[in-house]
Amino acid sequence: MFLATLITFALLYATDAPLYEAELIFPPEAFHNHSSSIVETAGGDLIVCWFHGKGERTDDTLVISGARKNKGDSTWSAPFIMADNQNLPDQNCTLFIDPDGRLWLFWISSIDNLVRSYFLKYRTSIDFEGDGPPVWNWQDAIFCRPRDAEQFFPKYLESRIEQIKASTEIGEDRKKQILSKIEERRDVYSDKLFQRLGWMPRQPPIMLTKNRMMLGLYSDTFDCSMFAFTEDAGVTWEFSQPLAQPGIQPSVVRKQNGNLVAFMRDSPVVRRAESSDGGMTWTPDPLEIANSGSSVAALGLRNGHWILAVNDVPEGRHVLTLYLSEDEGKTWNVKRHLENLEPEMGSGHYPTLIQTADGSIHCTYTHEDKQKFEGKTIKHVRFNEAWIKAE
């Protein structure tokens, strides 16, 4: 099996033949299915999760659903439950397999159906090969205490107001909306409870060393991101200072020199920041790729190239584009659409990217196409770098 994997991997990189496959993980339905994540197991199976229900934080029936496609199978399993804090809305799930072969599921539940009360949880499994859902052997909460929060947030409030007023990227009507929202939440910026609640995951963590995991988090309350770290498999956690710039739902890749680069959702462009101290502090690094204020996904390939998946239109989520960089994000000269639908006729958004053992790239995302079907599903595509370059 190991030799076969090596041969497949070598062939994928030795040939320039474009590869593209697409499928729906389950039939489209009227329910809200959103914010997916995907992993490959050591045995070559694929596991996907997403949240499922009638809406978002106001829907107490939301659950974390999952499905699997075992190696050699041509179809996905029927969906199953991955997590359910009963009578609370469960959202924003992400999956990860660490170097010790442990499967992690991170997600949040809202305590009062508002963004301010999102409560961060995780569970782990060492028994997730085979059929059906993982067998979970541990579950815990992550209590967030942003570094220097009491000093950071009041200063960030005032600097954010000045940034918005001075911005040439935001129209006057939009400025008024944002400033009004901030003023409504002014008291929250000095409230310890809400400085520590409301932090959400979106993209999977990365390993900085064999034991040190870094998980990107973000807050809709404060419209900013931060990072959580553990070196003991989740027993204890430490936190960075929040990033003093707009941008949420960070997706991180590592440069060859060890620096970390975070790509974040915002409008009208993708936000980017770089860290040279292992993710504890970050410096803004402007990027001129459009974003309609929707989740982005970044992936560093084994050959050193980077991929960025983004809704690169001024408004809407009907266009989902892959960007390719061969120089660690200095230039993004190659791009190809994963979805290119007419406005109001569908969407492809909230992507997650992985590269599997055979070298191919996988992306899952929320999908609807009103010209082909009614409802919403999670779409899975498998492709290679040659396909991105082939257009």
Image (cartoon, helix red, strand yellow):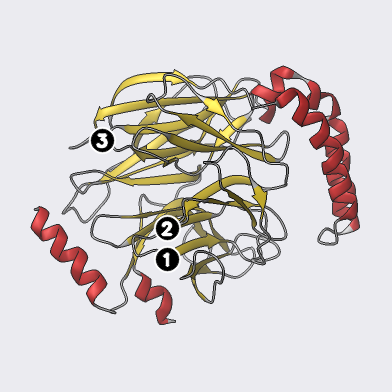
* Left or right: where 42 falls relative to 114: left
Query: Which of the two residues, 169 or 232, is positioned nearer the viewer here?
Result: 232
Query: Which of the two residues, 369 or 190, is positioned nearer the viewer here?
Result: 190
Categorize mark 2 by other alpha carbons within 10 Å: few (<14), some (14-19), many (20+). some
Disc 1 residue type (three-letter) = His
Label 3 and label 1: CA atoms lie apart by 26 Å
**Place of residue 104 in the rendered image (x, y in percent of width and height, measured from the top left):** 37, 32
First along the sequence among labels 3 and 1: 3
Q: What residue is shown with label 3?
A: 101
**Place of residue 202 in the rendered image (x, y in percent of width and height, measured from the top left):** 52, 41
Q: Which residue is located at x 67 percent, y 67 percent?
A: 288
Q: How many marks?
A: 3
Q: What residue is shown with label 2?
A: 300
Categorize mark 1 by other alpha carbons within 10 Å: few (<14), some (14-19), many (20+). some
**Place of residue 145 in the rendered image (x, y in percent of width and height, measured from the top left):** 62, 22
First along the sequence among labels 2 and 1: 2
The image quarter in which residue 300 lies = bottom left
User: Decide: marks 2, 1 in contact (CB < 8 A)?
Assistant: yes
Q: Which residue is located at x 88 percent, y 40 percent?
A: 180
First along the sequence among labels 2 and 3: 3
> Would residue 338 be seen by someone viewing this image from the given angle?
no
Disc 2 residue type (three-letter) = Gly
User: Decide: marks 2, 3 in contact (CB < 8 A)?
Assistant: no
Disc 3 residue type (three-letter) = Gly
Label 2 and label 3: CA atoms lie apart by 21 Å
The image quarter in which residue 390 lies = bottom left
As helix, strand or loop, the secondary structure at mark 2 comes to strand
